Image (tube, grey):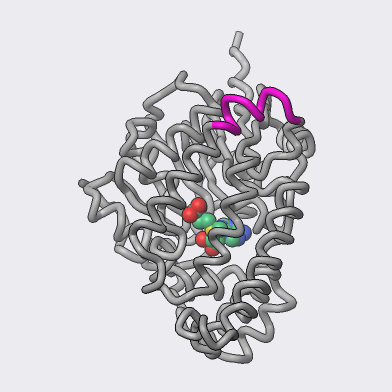
């Protein structure tokens, strides 16, 4: 294992700030980048647990399946790869464990996330370095990487096309990018509506005296509502698959392709996730968690094998996109 940086990135990187002041939070409502740093620095320590992120077979196969669904297997293993908005390292570290990538670099706007991603990489014995980086101004030289990846990051970036131009700049000629886990326009609409309805129903039902021990303390519910308000500031975009293809091409990419997944899995998954967030953790038995996970697996299979063949791609919840940097011109 080799680390070319300290556990929190390079010495010049800013330090994490997990306890933002009230003034900082107020300022963040008008500044999506500050909101991203505060929100994700605050979340970094508990992020893996909140989103059920692991670094075992379950998430390794999820990450590699998603990657291969849009980019195939050609080119693997990529000698060098960089992740934008890596968070705690879910996508890049699991792709490395799945044999898709040899050496990795994690980057994120939130110093807290870079710190946790590097700690996760070290624990897993992976060859990873990291930097605090804004996707619109990537602090790496031109032609540095064979692959750039991102998961659930594009929708947080104010100028997505500027970020895609930066991605193409740091890719080597012929190098590939893969962005996955982005919300589609239609998917985000029904997921939000279902989430809001489930939150309202669950928190109101739990006010009934016989369900009182299912009610989370009001202070915790208020904190979740404040987090949701900040979440609305950091979630900037939803995408149409064709719009994402067009943006990638106009940033200079070739062989561009967008693919979508999760329809029935999202229709069931968002109410389940919201219900789980609204009730006390100790009420969620192992049996319930297994049921929810198996249901999601079955519905994902139905989406992939059946619904993706008959429904328009815009209806699905997730969109992923890939493209390559044009090869260098041959010198005569
Ligand atoms: C929803 S999280 C996803 C994290 C991780 N990729 C995953 O899938 O678990 C989005 C991440 O993007 C980062 N981010 C937001 N805006 C960014 C920007 N302009 N440049 C780089 N990273 C950014 C956030 O700090 C956060 O860690």
Q: Quick check: can you spot residue 15?
A: yes
Residue 260, located in which quarter of the rendered image? top right
Q: Residue at x 54, y 45 (%)?
A: 150
Which residue reaches farthest front? 210
Q: Which residues are magenta?
A: 302-311
* Residue 75 rendering spot, x and y as whole percentages: 44, 21
Q: Quadrant of ligand 1?
A: bottom right
* Residue 253 rendering spot, x and y as whole percentages: 68, 30
Label the magenta part by its dominant secondary structure. helix
* Residue 53 rendering spot, x and y as whole percentages: 40, 54
* The C terminus lies in quadrant: top right
Residue 205, located in which quarter of the rendered image? bottom right
Q: Is residue 194 above or below residue 102?
A: below
* Residue 252 rendering spot, x and y as whole percentages: 71, 32
> Is 194 placed left or right of 177 in the picture?
right
> Is 84 placed left or right of 200 in the picture?
left
Q: Residue at x 56, y 36 (%)?
A: 178
């Amino acid at each position: 294992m080799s680390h070319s940086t300290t556990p929190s990135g390079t010495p010049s990187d800013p330090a994490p700030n997990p306890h933002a002041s009230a003034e900082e939070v107020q300022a963040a409502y008008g500044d999506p980048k500050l909101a991203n740093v505060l929100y994700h620095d605050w979340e970094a320590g508990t992020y893996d647990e909140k989103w059920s992120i692991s670094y075992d077979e379950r998430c390794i196969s999820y990450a590699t399946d998603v990657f291969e669904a849009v980019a195939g297997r050609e080119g693997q293993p990529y000698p060098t790869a960089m992740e934008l908005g890596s968070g705690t390292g879910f996508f890049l570290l699991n792709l490395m464990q799945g044999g898709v990538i040899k050496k990795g670099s994690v980057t994120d706007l939130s110093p807290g996330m870079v710190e946790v991603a590097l700690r996760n990489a070290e624990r897993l014995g992976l060859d990873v370095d990291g930097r605090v980086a804004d996707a619109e101004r990537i602090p790496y030289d031109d032609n540095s990487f064979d692959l750039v990846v991102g998961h659930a990051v594009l929708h947080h970036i104010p100028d997505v096309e500027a970020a895609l131009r930066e991605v193409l700049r740091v890719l080597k000629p012929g190098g590939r990018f893969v962005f996955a886990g982005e919300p589609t326009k239609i998917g985000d609409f029904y997921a939000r509506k279902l989430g809001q309805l489930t939150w309202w129903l669950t928190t109101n039902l739990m006010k009934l005296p016989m369900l009182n021990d299912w009610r989370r303390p009001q202070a915790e519910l208020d904190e979740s509502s404040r987090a949701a308000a900040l979440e609305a500031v950091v979630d900037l975009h939803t995408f149409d698959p064709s719009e994402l293809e067009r943006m990638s091409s106009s940033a200079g990419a070739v062989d561009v392709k967008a693919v979508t997944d999760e329809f029935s899995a999202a229709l069931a998954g968002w109410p389940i996730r919201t219900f789980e967030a609204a009730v006390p953790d100790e009420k969620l038995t192992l049996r319930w968690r297994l049921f929810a996970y198996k249901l999601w697996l079955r519905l994902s299979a139905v989406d992939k094998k059946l619904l993706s063949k008959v429904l328009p791609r815009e209806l699905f919840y997730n969109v992923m996109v890939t493209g390559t940097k044009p090869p260098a011109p041959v010198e005569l």
